[in-house]
Structure formats: structure tokens, C-alpha cells
Image (spheres, rainbow, N blue to C red):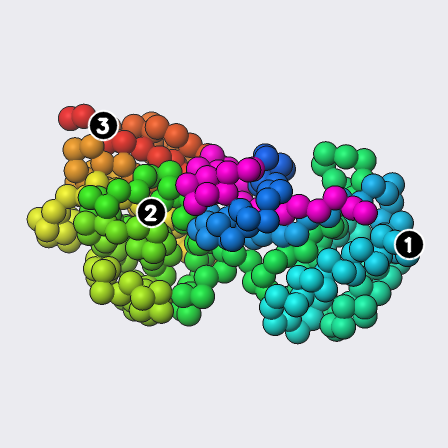
Amino acid sequence: MPASRYFLEVPAGTEVVARAELQRLGAKRLSEFPGGFRLVQDADLAKALRARTLAAAYLSMTFAVPRPKALLGDANFRALVAAVKGVAARGVYGGLRFSAAGADSPTMTRLASSLASEVGLPWRQDDGELLVRLRPDPATAGWEVLVRLTPRPSSTRAWRVCNRPGGLNAAVAAAMNEFAGVDARDAYLNLMCGSGTLLIERALRAPARRLVGFDVDPDAVRCAETNAGAAGVAKRCELSVGDLTDPRFVEELGATGRFDVLTADAPWGDAVGAHAANRALYPKLFSAAAALAAPDARFCLLSHELRLLRSVVLDQPWWRVEHEAQVAHGGHHPLVLLMSRAQE
């Protein structure tokens, strides 16, 4: 019989904070594994599934076979079908999707179609909710089959009822908040909040003294308000239209109090913003954040404008980099910077 366990996938680059969150929730028997963590104890699974930094959770089975074709053998295939049926029984699924290198090869095609038939679901390669992945097992000479435990990835939030171009992955947003630190005494500010992912994830994570977000685009603010309502945190979040490049707005917001934690998903210049405009915007972002920050504030910023971001960091006096990580985000690897307020 194949060895069974669970695989907890987290966005690459967030492993440190993801492990800390999983352990805080009580999932302590973790082993590092490429792309996330392996979990052996069933008792820890329910705890792990509560982690906001989790991208997806899978049943993991390692088959000691040299080639995927061997999975069609009687004993291996029966074990595989039983495992997939067990996951399918936990949720509502309209189809099965199969993911593997060379998924359109005859062997993979036969494996996928046979598996779907035995499980009793149509094989829907584009949008099947029951995801089965096949990959070489990084720790052995065999093959690992991963069966996602939920119809949607864990990072796909039910509260996201309004979408905007360039929206931030919720698991990455949760990781950014963990990087910045979570304290109920904090006043928290999300600059350029967009659809509200960072702000809402912080509101759902734990209490805060204050939760504030703003964006220059009124449509974005309305979208964030809609999402905050769906998440049940609208009454705790202060959302407004505001331009960080407008000194009057920054001064008025600062007059309401300074912020202990600031976060921003700055425009990348592709789905949102433009590279030329970002050259003028980024220095003003750092300046506005400094003007709104409490003396010991932390500022967590994400951007795919890697060269621009590094050059602006070197040229500004307000923020000192404490930690940096490149994280996986929709085929990109943007940079997360955690900074502390430099002393005047």
C-alpha cells in the first residue's frame, strides 16, 4: 500500500510565517517539503486547515513505482481510486481535473479518464473542482499523487465577492500581515487598499485598535466595502477615497492618529498602474507612509517592480529593511519588504 499523509501548500517565500501560524494553531508535527509542509497526524489536519497562509491542502500518497504507467496496475489503481473517492465524499464536486507534466500524453490521459470513470465524475480538465496532481516524489524514487481536500484552493476566500484587476492572493496577504506582526493594540493602515485583501485578512486574523484603508479609485473603495461586508468586518474597517500623493489628504489622515503597522500592494505596472508612473509614485508612497507612521512602526510592502523598489529603498531615509522575501504569486515572484521606521 502507498504511504499516505497530507501536504500543506503555501506560497513560496512565506514558509517561515506559515510554519509559525500552523504551529500556533496546533499543527505541530510538520516536516518541511518542497512547496510547503507534510503533515502526518489526522488530528492536526483540522487545525492546519484554519491557517490563513495556507494556499491548499492535499491528501498525499507516495507510490513506489518507477513510472506513472504502473499506477494503472490493479493494486495501485484500486488504492488510488479509494483515496480519491474518500476525498470526493467530503464535498460537492462537478468534475475531476488531472494535473501532471505531460498531462496530454496517452498514459496520463488514460489514467485521468479511468480515474474519473471509477470515481463517478466527468473528466473536466479545464474546470473540474476535484483536483488530482501527479509529480515525482521529491523524497523518493517513486511518484506522489496529491488530491486536493477542498473544491477550491484555501487561498480562494468566500468573502471575495468583488474582484479587481491585479487583486492580491489572500494567502500572500495573510503572510504579509504575519511578517508585519499582529497585535491587538496596533493601529493598522492599508495604503492603496484596492479590493481590500490586506485589510480584510488583518481584520479576520485578530482584533486591532484601528483598521483603516484608502485608495485613490472610488470604485476600488466600493469594492473593498463590498468585500468587507461579505467578510463580516465592515463595521470594524474605516475605508475612504484618498490620494497618497496629495499632502492635504495625508495630513488630514495623520491628524486622526499615527499607525503602528502599514501595508501596501503597490502597483506593478502590468494589471494595475504603469511603469513610468510608478517611478514617480513609489518615492511618494514611502514618504506618505513615513508621515503616517508611529515612531516604531512596521511597513510591509509588496511589488514586482524589483529594480525600482530596491533603488527607491536605497534613496529614502525613512524606512530600514528588516526582512525581504520573494514570494510566488500567480506565476510572478514579487518582493515583500518588511521595514521599520528609521529614527529621525
**Residue 236, magenta (yes or no):** no
Q: Position of residue 184 (x, y in %)?
A: 23, 46
Q: Amino acid at mark 1?
A: Gly
- Number of other residues with Cα within 10 Å of mark 3, as a class: few under 14, some 14 to 19, many 20 or more: some
Tell me the quadrant of the picture where the C terminus can be found.
Answer: top left
Q: Against 124, is 70 above or below? A: above
Q: Amino acid at mark 2?
A: Ala
Q: Secondary structure at mark 1?
A: loop
- Number of other residues with Cα within 10 Å of mark 2, as a class: few under 14, some 14 to 19, many 20 or more: many
Can residue 284 be seen at all in this image of the molecule?
Answer: no
Q: Nearer the viewer, residue 288 or 177?
A: 177
Q: Position of residue 228 (x, y in %)?
A: 32, 64
Task: Say which residue appears at 30% left-offset and 42% top-offset.
Answer: 182
Q: In this figure, which residue is indicated by the disc labeled 2?
A: 264
Q: Is residue 306 left or right of residue 98?
A: left
Q: In this figure, which residue is indicated by the disc labeled 1?
A: 73
- Please report whichever mark, 1 or 3, sits nearer to the chain's N-terminal start: 1
Q: Secondary structure at mark 3?
A: loop
Q: Nearer the viewer, mark 2 or mark 1?
A: 1
Q: Nearer the viewer, residue 250 or 169?
A: 169
Give the Cα separation between the discs numbered 1 and 3.
63 Å
Q: Amino acid at mark 3?
A: Ala
Q: Against 314, is 253 above or below? A: below
Q: Position of residue 254 (x, y in %)?
A: 13, 47
Task: Say which residue appears at 71% left-offset and 47% top-offset.
Answer: 4
The magenta segment is 1-30
Numbered badge on residue 342 = 3
Q: Determine whether label 1 and label 3 are within 8 Å by CB.
A: no
